[in-house]
């Protein structure tokens, strides 16, 4: 579903998959988006006319999650065996295949500068892939259980991850150092997002709460408790002035960051 963030009206529904969608990612500097589904299809979308423009038929659980580079030129998928595949945006032939030697890939995101791919796995590992070389740059094992979400800071230097251990972890993406860990949620942290204009991080959890954090001193600034069910996703709008969150009962809530 696509919604207007100003008047909160639904614009359209993206129709094309035959079964449930397992991941969706938009290119920040392009009009392209990519999605994966239980129907084993990888789809590329035009976000202006909200129509699918390319489809790749893959095997069962061969692409549980996907990410698209900021310029929309490269797509990455992760499968149940820990394999990462890079595709051009034509979705015809794979560009490269990387073996993480892990298990189920559960989360993926390109860095804002497009140089790195962050990957989370069922084993609790977080991987940083160098996109240019297609090689594993760093690996972190701090979670100990399933990683649900990975994001980079706006300068692309730090990778942030969250998961079933109820924590939010900060790692130096380039040099491989552990930087910090945030505690506060009492359930799995399903989703995180970095504010595009301010030093804020938002997190959503099965504890029904959204937390807003200061990225500089890494302290919790606000706790939002308006959801009545576990919160599966949270994101900032392009201006960084609002958060939007979605919960298990289908509620979508908007909150001002001001």
Image (cartoon, rainbow, N blue to C red):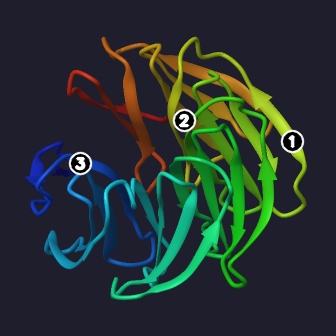
Q: Is residue 128 left or right of residue 33?
A: right
Structural distance between the alpha carbons of marks 1 and 2 = 18 Å
Residue at 31% in and 56% down: 60
Which residue is the site of mark 3? 6
Judge the density around disc 2: few (<14), some (14-19), many (≥20) Cα neighbours within 10 Å: many
Q: If you read the primary sequence from the N terminus, does the residue marked by circle 3 or circle 2 appear first?
A: 3
Q: Return the mark for residue 202.
A: 2
- Image spot of residue 244 (x, y percent): 36, 38
Structural distance between the alpha carbons of marks 1 and 3 = 37 Å
Residue at 20% in and 28% down: 250
Identify whether 258 is placed above or below 88: above
Q: How many marks?
A: 3
Residue 70 in sight from this viewpoint: no
Residue at 65% in and 60% down: 154
Q: If you read the primary sequence from the N terminus, does the residue marked by circle 1 or circle 3 appear first?
A: 3
Identify whether 170 is placed above or below 146: below
Whether the residues at callouts 3 and 2 have beta carbons within 8 Å, the answer is no
Structural distance between the alpha carbons of marks 3 and 2 = 20 Å
Disc 1 on helix, strand or loop? strand
Quarter of the figure with residue 184: top right
Front in this rendered view, residue 53 or 136: 136
Which residue is the site of mark 1? 179
User: Foreground mark, 1 or 2?
Assistant: 1
Q: Return the mark for residue 52.
A: none
Q: If you read the primary sequence from the N terminus, does the residue marked by circle 1 or circle 2 appear first?
A: 1
């Amino acid at each position: 579903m696509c919604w207007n963030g100003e008047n909160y009206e639904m614009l359209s529904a993206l129709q094309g998959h035959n079964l449930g969608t397992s991941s969706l990612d938009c290119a920040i500097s392009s009009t392209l988006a990519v999605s994966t589904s239980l129907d084993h299809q990888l789809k590329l979308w035009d976000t202006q006319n909200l129509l699918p423009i390319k489809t790749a038929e893959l095997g069962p659980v061969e692409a549980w999650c996907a990410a698209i580079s900021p310029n929309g030129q490269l797509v990455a998928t992760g499968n149940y065996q820990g394999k990462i595949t890079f595709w051009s945006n034509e979705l015809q032939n794979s560009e490269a295949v990387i073996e993480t030697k892990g298990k189920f890939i559960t989360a993926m995101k390109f860095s804002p500068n497009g140089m790195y791919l962050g990957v989370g796995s069922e084993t609790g590992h977080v991987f940083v892939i160098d996109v240019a070389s297609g090689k594993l740059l760093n690996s972190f094992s701090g979670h100990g259980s399933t990683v649900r979400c990975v994001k980079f800071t706006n300068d692309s230097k730090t990778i942030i991850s969250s998961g079933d251990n109820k924590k939010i972890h900060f790692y130096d993406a380039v040099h491989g150092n552990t930087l910090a860990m945030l505690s506060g949620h009492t359930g799995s942290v399903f989703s995180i997002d970095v504010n595009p204009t301010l030093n804020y991080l938002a997190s959503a959890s099965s504890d029904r709460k959204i937390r807003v954090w200061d990225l500089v001193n890494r302290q919790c600034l606000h706790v939002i408790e308006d959801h009545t069910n576990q919160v599966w996703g949270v994101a900032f709008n392009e201006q960084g002035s609002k958060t939007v969150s979605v919960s298990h009962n289908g509620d979508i809530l908007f909150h001002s960051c001001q």
